Amino acid sequence: MDNLQELLHGFTIAVTVPHLVLMAIGVLLGILVGVLPGLGAPNGVSLLLPLTFGMQPVSAIILLSSMYWGALFGGSVTSILFNIPGEPSSVATTFDGYPMARDGRPTTALATAFGSAAFGALVGVILITFLASWVAQVALAFGPPEYFAVYFLAFASFVGMGGAAPIKTVVALAIGFAIAAIGIDTVSGSVRLTMGIDELVKGVNFVVAVMGLFGIGELLVAVEEEFHARAVSSKIDWGEVFRAVARLPRHGVALLRSAAIGCWMGITPGGPTAASFMSYGIARRFSRRGRYFGTGEVEGIISPETADHAAGTSALLPMLSLGIPGSATAAVMMGGLMIWGLNPGPMLFVDQKDFVWGLIASMYVGNIVAVALVLLTVPVFAALMRIPFVVIAPLIVIICVVGAYSVSNSYLDVVMMLGFGIVGYLFKKLFYPLAPLVLAIVIGDKAEDAFRQSMLMSKGSLGIFFANGLVTSLVIAGIALLLLPLALQLTRPWRKPAPPTAETTSQEKVII
Amino acid sequence: MGRTSTFLLSAAAALLAGTMPALAAWQPQKPIEFVATAGPGGGTDNLARAVQNIITKYKLTDQPIVVVNKGGGSGAEGYVYGKASAGDPYKVIFGTSNAWQQPLVSKVAFNYTDLTPIAAMAQDEFLLWVKQDAPYKTAGDYLKAAASSEFKMGGAQSKDTDEVLTRMIEKIGHVKLTYIPFKSGAEAAVQLAGGHIDSHVNNPSESLGQWRGGTQRPLCAFSPKRLPQGAKITATEGWSDVPTCVEQGLDIKQYEQPRTVWLPGKVTPDQAAFYVDLMKKVQATPEWKDYIEKTSQVDTFLTGADFDKFIKEDLEHLRQVASEQGWLVK
């Protein structure tokens, strides 16, 4: 129980008045950058970084990590209210969060999201506290073949467990892979698919794609179908905030399952994005109300949010113990660590105990501060839904344009964002799922790099994916998921009359 | 405001520049953009932010400075942006030797001649790293072991500095290495710690933590003389205890990566002179020394004809390696 003692020592560092004040400031700034278009956690943290140079390292990291928690929560706000995810990992939250908010229950949606996010983060921190050294070892076991196997598993779980027709999922994934391939290729160093446009050498930014696909795409569908029915009369109801949080324990199974998926994907380098998608896909398959997913189901919000935050939190551990930044934000923080004179790596836990355990303790306290602050803001944000559609629609366009432009001050990004808007609209009209497309854009190039690195290592033999127990079991699980739809199809004649398939149920289910 | 800031500026200049010529003829009139050709947290980004902080702290110019990251396409995004901003003296591009190396080996839409060179500040060293428990103690042992079995060498990016150095080791050490490109040196370091590759050639700052943590150790430094004495990294050793590769029979005398500063093309000589002067002032501060020491780099300053000569020599050398490997584009 050494760790417990260290943790208690950490609390004595984290729970002091100046540090609590820093946490509150960090969280509020974080919520602000999370909600504002195009800012996001990495930019927020790098803007704040120069201010921390004069601080104690532990105070500095508390400020920055609190900002990170705040931004994660803030990012869910726009996902739920406007269908515009601010971070890759909050895409899955839009699937049920947005329909629920549109149904007139924005308070419930936000409070549920925040409550389950806090639960996920808490599980993640507990994991870090007790399994720090073991977790660091697990991450070391991951070479290129293992990385590829994890990504493969994430893609396969979509084909096997996603709600849409498997073949449509595969098509969406393939389009995503093609988009992810644009730009400079890591393995050969050459430029691919830039179609003569010099600027495309940087590749397609995720934010640009998602703002178009979700924000603009949804807007186009709404304009066509139901544009008068959008103003929602939601009362500012403080009680509902607490009732929604109090209802969470009823979904205990979903919470625990999602937290487990999140932690697993956070430690193995799958990351929060893959975690939230996988958790959503698995929940839809196993939840009693899985067939209603996509129409504003509570568990459809709980699953991705819990997994996202569990993964996001436990992913900080490899950064501290191995020096691998798990996300852009973690990379900026690592830059900060170096400037403060600390070196991320295995020795941080030995040399800088005050820093490490102060940070871990601050994760407990910081998340509690964050969740308290965001829950207080829920009614304010929910009130935004009362603004009529004619006012909110131009606002969404402005948010998307400004957001796309501010990614790298480029007009090309704005044009691409609008292009993605049309793609998003077509996908919805043709019942193609957007989620696999986004997942492939985000982790497609990583999966490709890992595959080709493995091929370099094995001189072209696929045997490297069956070389040890870890990679073999991951690959076999992936293949099994991939073949699941096929197996169900084949066994159908022997079973009772087929349940309604994706095509025949409500359209809203299919577009997810 | 005009008078106060001019006063501050001249005061600061007088204080810092000492014997340097008085204010350059051209002065910036609006905010300056520092373009880091790397993502947040990378070496180039750290440099841009360190310079920004020093300039802000000493008020070396009265215009605000913002750092933007354009690291897409291994930095090509930032250089292409610089090319597109021809004639705009308010964009300062921070990069590495990438600026002239990348156009040689991959079809990117810029060349270093599209930019105005300002200076090369700080050189990053390269070392040969192996896993802590590897049996070989010297570069000689390593080469002997590599001759009998094919080793996997990891590195950042493809056809970039790390791979060029790997090919040089192959040629001079008479061995065959399988080069595995990763996104960054930090990733390669983790792969080495996990035993998935046999070695890498990271910069000191990229693997400092792992050395101290006892997961990997440097065999030798690709430098003409041993690295400067600093604080001890492990219980017994510091950078100056790492032998040079030449000492150990791997005859690569010098291999370094300069950090470079550029303006877009078609700026006036006055404007370029202002930034050369500005960078000189930055380099004279204690904060700069501190930055160099913390990142274990070598403090250099090349500008004008010296910088040009350096680029030409480096290009000549790369062209040779690249043509042997069949990397040259067109």
Image (cartoon, coloured by chain):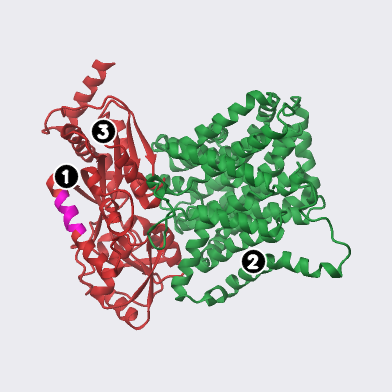
Left or right: where B21 falls relative to B157: left
- Which amino acid type is shown beneath numbered disc 3? Pro
Q: Which residues are magenta?
A: B308-315
Look at the numbered disc 2 and give the secondary structure of its residue: helix
Instruction: Say few, some or many: other residues with alpha carbon within 10 Å of mark 1 (under 14 / 14 to 19 / 20 or more).
Output: some
Question: Disc 2 is attached to a residue of which chain?
Answer: A
The Cα–Cα distance between marks 3 and 2, rounded to whole angstroms, is 53 Å
Q: Is residue A46 above or below residue B112?
A: above
Left or right: where A288 falls relative to A40: right
Q: Residue A176, percent across and down?
A: 56, 53
Marks 3, 2 in one chain: no
Residue at left offset 62%, top offset 68%: A474
Is residue A130 visible to us here? no
Question: Disc 3 is attached to a residue of which chain?
Answer: B
Front tag of 1 and 3: 3
Residue A478 disc label: 2
Instruction: Say few, some or many: other residues with alpha carbon within 10 Å of mark 2 (under 14 / 14 to 19 / 20 or more).
Output: many
Instruction: Say few, some or many: other residues with alpha carbon within 10 Å of mark 3 (under 14 / 14 to 19 / 20 or more).
Output: many
The residue beneath circle 1 is B303
Residue at left offset 37%, top offset 59%: A189
Left or right: where A215 falls relative to B20: right
Is residue A214 visible to us here? yes
Front tag of 2 and 1: 2
Question: Disc 1 is attached to a residue of which chain?
Answer: B
Chain letter, colour green in render: A
The residue beneath circle 3 is B89
- Which amino acid type is shown beneath numbered disc 2? Gly
- For the residues labelled 3 and 2, say whether their Cβ atoms are less than 8 Å apart: no
Look at the numbered disc 3 and give the secondary structure of its residue: loop
State yes or no: residue A31 in magenta.
Answer: no
Chain letter, colour red in render: B
Q: Quadrant of the N terminus of chain A?
A: bottom right
